[in-house]
Amino acid sequence: MRFEDAMRLSAPIQAEADHVHVWLISLDASESELAHCQELMSVSEIERAGRFLGRTDRDHFIVTRALLRRLLGLYCETPASDIQFGVEADGKPLLLCDRHPSLTFNLSHSGGMMLLGVADGRPVGVDIEAQSHRTDPLRIAKRYFFGAEVSDIEEAPERQRNALFLQYWVAKEAALKAAGVGLRYPLDGLCVHFSPDRMDANVESLQPERLPADLKVRMLPSEPGWYAAIASRGHPWKCRRMPVAGTAPIYAA
């Protein structure tokens, strides 16, 4: 979805208890659009934007915060500039919305794309990563991944290793963010078990007291060159790609 299309949305959006809404949006914006984005941001967000050394990173941060505020404002039926955030005890960002106190969200951005997950009454975690051929996926996997995952990558043809590595990486990140532990939990302390089509995954933890046993991960179809995943827990849930136009894709999880 294009940035300008997302910013034009105006109708209230209703979250669903048995679905996680998924927004995948380009962060490309013009100078005038960037100026409008800054009008929606808080003072602390503007200060954070000013600390970026690179212009591209700064601009993407500005657009991401504006889009986040704009979309959450539609769920909360609140002006974007009035959206308030807090922090949970584990450090995870928290939406403060009196109209819909059970609304949850999680955000990730990479390579000029933003991924947002929104849910009602359930934790959600998302991750998106742009493909890079400058990394050595096997070397990183041997350092940070579970043994079976390393073997899966090592046994694959070399041209497929980067894709497999990124599938595991975004799945792990999304699961840890949904659990609210982030990278404080070691990546080699959980093992991702993909389904045969590699679109769904269960998560096995070596420290089950820290990581919920009912975490489920869904890999998301995305633009070429990106890998994305979303995770949540609890009773069966589905992903709904937003905005709904015609027949919206719904992915079981």
Image (spheres, helix red, strand yellow):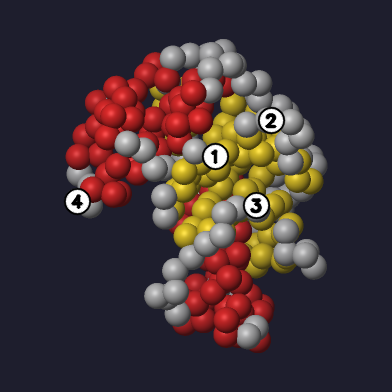
Tell me the residue at 63%/75% (across/down). Answer: 149
Instruction: Give the number of the disc on residue 245.
Output: 2
Q: CA distance from mark 2 to mark 3?
A: 18 Å
The kind of residue tagged 3 is Leu
The kind of residue tagged 4 is Leu
Residue position for label 1: 1
Dot 2 or dot 1: first in sequence order is 1
Instruction: Give the number of the disc on residue 220.
Output: 3
Q: Position of residue 110 (x, y in %)?
A: 43, 53
* Residue 166 located left or right of residue 133: right
The kind of residue tagged 1 is Met
Tell me the residue at 25%/39% (across/down). Answer: 49
- 224 relative to 35, above or below: below
- 156 relative to 73, above or below: below
Say which element carries label 4.
loop
Tell me the residue at 33%/30% (across/down). Answer: 33
Dot 1 or dot 3: first in sequence order is 1
Residue position for label 4: 53
Displayed quadrant of residue 45: top left
- In this rendered view, identify the residue nearer to me: 215 or 69: 69
Between circles 2 and 4, the one closer to the viewer is 2
Q: Position of residue 227 (x, y in %)?
A: 56, 59
